[in-house]
């Protein structure tokens, strides 16, 4: 009951703050972002010492090393958070931008104008820097934000939120603009996702199960940031040396992230020439290969891929490999098993590339480049609040602009409808 | 079980059709739309005779006259459906439109391109013309559509869908692009709204309860087309003669629709001058007035408004009236009781108008014009599939463009991430 009341109060405060924030000047918002950047840097010691408590507990609980790595805050990560906030301050303010304008025959002037979404609730796991990025992006877009981090990072998130709040509020941002759910009780999430009228969108960032559960319970609209099961298809027309470099990059450069390659598809006409060298390179980098029958007919020593491999996001140094008879087979495979995230074709043949780019149903489709580029920063959007792999509202990396809605503003001089 | 299987098969067919439709040429789509327009006209008699069955049953069941009116198909309504399809054919094709383009420092060229949403499920009540409008709009946007009309219109919807399907498929549109749920069993809806991976968006059009129920059950993203509780605020600076014309139009011209005025807010400084004449005009048009204390102190004969009046969408010749002390009180009232649909300020004072347009949180805000203009046609969008009053994806009237998603298409020449 206490949690319910607290969450409700939080949402009310956020809604009040949001209506004031819609009218803040760009310069005030930027001043606050720079003050937040400075405060994060100045309070580095406090943040790191609180983070040590979380890291210690995570180790005691025996959490995976990759999770502990993501949880850890150090000087470099503090600098990156601070830099992120400064970059957000430099982005153009999306609020008030007129994106369509028309004059109707009856003289009505109609503008479609960007406005804040209102109250954004973000539910995320482990990485404390999300607290900082999300608060900065939402502030720039004129939204109030309710942050709900993972229980494993609660001490880190609480100090980061406190530092950001103090800096923002003393710069003139209304109280309630940045709030952190300070309980780790799941009840709070179940409640937040049903608060239509107070919360305008819920953005879950984390495991597939977590997102699925939120979607099943929510009545507030949800933008899911889900898994990345990305493919590269090497066409028979590909420049095979380029293909080797790109495929290696997409798998090995950072295997634990959502835009890394999980399945390699190779056209049968060049499989015999391409795969032996490519797989040797992967094996030298300790990548475990799981091949289909045809791959094994070329390289008999590799492990056999099972049906579930095609739908597994490894996030690890493991790669499934399949030899396909045609471009169409590659496209069908991707549309069947892919997660609509990032998909690439490597080809010289322009027609093949165009067919792939058109028919593959994903948020980002690449021709002759690594899937690893799907990222707000790499796409020139400054920071990102995540990568949407649904089709509504925003698809792909989401930045400040994707955290806005629109409003029709109509100017008349007495028009009535006949 | 049979219904479940049928619905599943329908969704599978729709998904298959959708992937073929993403690549249809504009000219093929337009040819199909014109064939559909022609077929609706040619089969007018068949449609009207099936509609008579629905109307007869509705009368036997004692449905409200307004519902029976909406259900009825006559020659004029046939012509309007046909005309709507021809207008959709004339609209520019949104699919393939490049809406953003950038070249990154590493040479990557990034296009943000409009693509179809995929499979759209529309759940609606009574008006059979929605079957035709929705099919036409979805086709133009390259989407497959699953139509679920109300049980009271099942015979009308079945014949309209059949006529549209025959014309579309014989023009080269893939089978499965237009499908109607032919059962009136509610199980089919419960199932549709949970078919993630097959259905990309659910658009409910109808009563508030119906939309609420769908949102509570859906896992597929929903765009709700909800109620319209619209206000007009007459500022102390208003041109009172213009105000009288606009307020009369917004209430009386068509009271049963979502963009009609339900509450009139009047600044206290001009209430004594404005209200007597205005209310007299309303009463002559048989509008029942429900006023607050201050209204009654000016015109003691009017009925008293109760608290629930401020949140009631009458859709009828009833109007609640409130005298406010200030612009801010008007804005607060609207943001508290409004449905984020259409809100107007009538004022000469530019600063007052700007404050209103900025601070009122609605999909469409008007200055010196009737709220009745919120409409896809009036906004120059051709037809509309409805009016969204949520903030995500599309807000306000939704046309062909709002039935699309986007995709990032990235052109490289061997880029890898460092």
Image (tube, coloured by chain):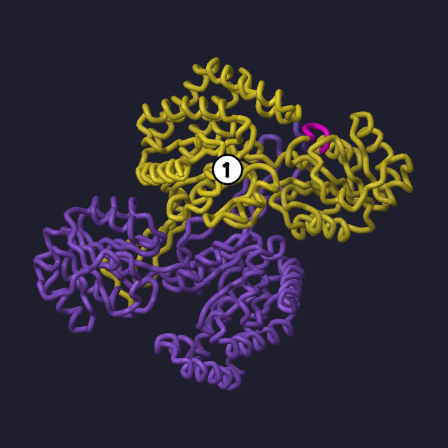
Chain colours: A purple, B yellow
To which chain does the residue with label 1 belong? B
Q: Taking the image as drawn, is residue B220 in sight?
A: yes
- Residue B224 vertical placement versus A219 (above, below): above
**In the visual, does A377 lie left or right of A217?**
left
Which of the two residues, B133 or B268, is positioned nearer the viewer here? Answer: B133
Which image quarter is the C terminus of chain B in?
bottom left
Which residues, given as a range, are shown in magenta? B251-255
- Residue A162 vertical placement versus B229 (above, below): below
Image coordinates for residue A330, horizontal then vertical, percent = 22, 49
Write down the quadrant of residue B251 in the picture. Answer: top right
**In the visual, does A36 lie left or right of A213?**
right
What's the magenta bit mostly, secondary-structure-wise? loop
Which image quarter is the N terminus of chain B in?
top left
Q: Callout 1: few (<14), some (14-19), or many (20+) C-alpha neighbours within 10 Å?
A: few
Q: Identify the element where label 1 is drawn.
A: loop
Q: Is residue B404 magenta?
A: no
Point 62% across, 20% down: residue = B59
Which of the two residues, B340 or A401, is positioned nearer the viewer here? Answer: B340
- Residue A227 vertical placement versus B206 (above, below): below
Point 29% across, 57% down: residue = A311
Image coordinates for residue B361, horizontal then vertical, percent = 64, 50
- Residue B375 vertical placement versus A14 (above, below): above
Image coordinates for residue A132, horizontal then vertical, percent = 50, 71
Write down the quadrant of residue B272 in the picture. Answer: top right
**In the visual, does B129 lie left or right of A395?**
right
Residue bearing mark 1? B186
Q: Taking the image as drawn, is residue A38 in sight?
A: no
Image coordinates for residue B413, horizontal then vertical, percent = 23, 57
């Amino acid at each position: 009951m206490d949690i319910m009341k607290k969450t409700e109060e939080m949402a009310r405060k956020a809604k009040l703050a949001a209506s004031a924030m819609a009218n803040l000047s760009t310069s005030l918002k930027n001043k606050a972002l720079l003050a937040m950047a400075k405060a994060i840097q100045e309070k580095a010691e406090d943040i790191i010492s609180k983070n040590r408590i979380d890291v210690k507990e995570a180790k005691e609980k025996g959490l995976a090393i990759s999770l502990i790595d993501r949880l850890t805050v150090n000087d470099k990560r503090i600098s990156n958070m601070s830099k992120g906030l400064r970059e957000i301050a430099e982005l153009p303010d999306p609020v008030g931008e007129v994106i369509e304008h028309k004059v109707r025959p009856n003289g009505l002037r109609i503008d479609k104008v960007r406005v804040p979404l209102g109250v954004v609730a973000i539910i995320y796991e482990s990485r404390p820097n999300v607290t900082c990025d999300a608060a900065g992006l939402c502030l720039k877009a004129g939204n109030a934000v309710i942050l709900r981090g993972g229980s494993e990072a609660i001490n880190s998130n609480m100090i980061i939120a406190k530092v950001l709040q103090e800096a923002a509020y003393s710069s003139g941002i209304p109280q309630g603009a940045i709030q952190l759910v300070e309980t780790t009780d799941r009840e709070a999430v179940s409640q937040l996702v049903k608060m239509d009228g107070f919360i305008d969108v819920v953005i879950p960032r984390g495991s597939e199960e977590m997102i699925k559960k939120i979607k099943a319970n929510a009545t507030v609209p949800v933008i899911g940031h889900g898994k990345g099961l990305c493919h590269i298809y090497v066409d028979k027309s590909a420049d095979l040396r380029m293909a080797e470099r790109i495929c290696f990059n997409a798998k090995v450069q950072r295997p634990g992230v959502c835009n890394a390659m999980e399945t390699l598809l190779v056209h049968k006409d060049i499989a015999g020439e391409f795969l032996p060298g490519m797989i040797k390179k992967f094996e030298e980098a300790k990548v475990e290969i799981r091949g289909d029958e045809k791959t094994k007919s070329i390289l008999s020593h590799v492990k056999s891929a099972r049906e579930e491999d095609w739908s597994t996001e490894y996030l690890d140094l493991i790669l499934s490999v399949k030899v396909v008879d045609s471009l169409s087979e590659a496209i069908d495979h991707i549309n069947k098993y892919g997660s609509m995230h990032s998909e690439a074709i490597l080809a010289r043949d322009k027609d093949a590339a165009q067919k792939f780019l058109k028919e593959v149903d994903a948020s980002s489709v690449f021709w002759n480049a690594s899937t690893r580029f799907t990222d707000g920063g790499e796409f020139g959007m400054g920071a990102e609040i995540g990568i949407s792999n649904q089709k509504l509202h925003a698809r792909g990396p989401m930045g400040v602009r994707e955290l806005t809605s629109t409003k029709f503003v109509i100017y008349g001089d007495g028009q009535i409808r006949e």
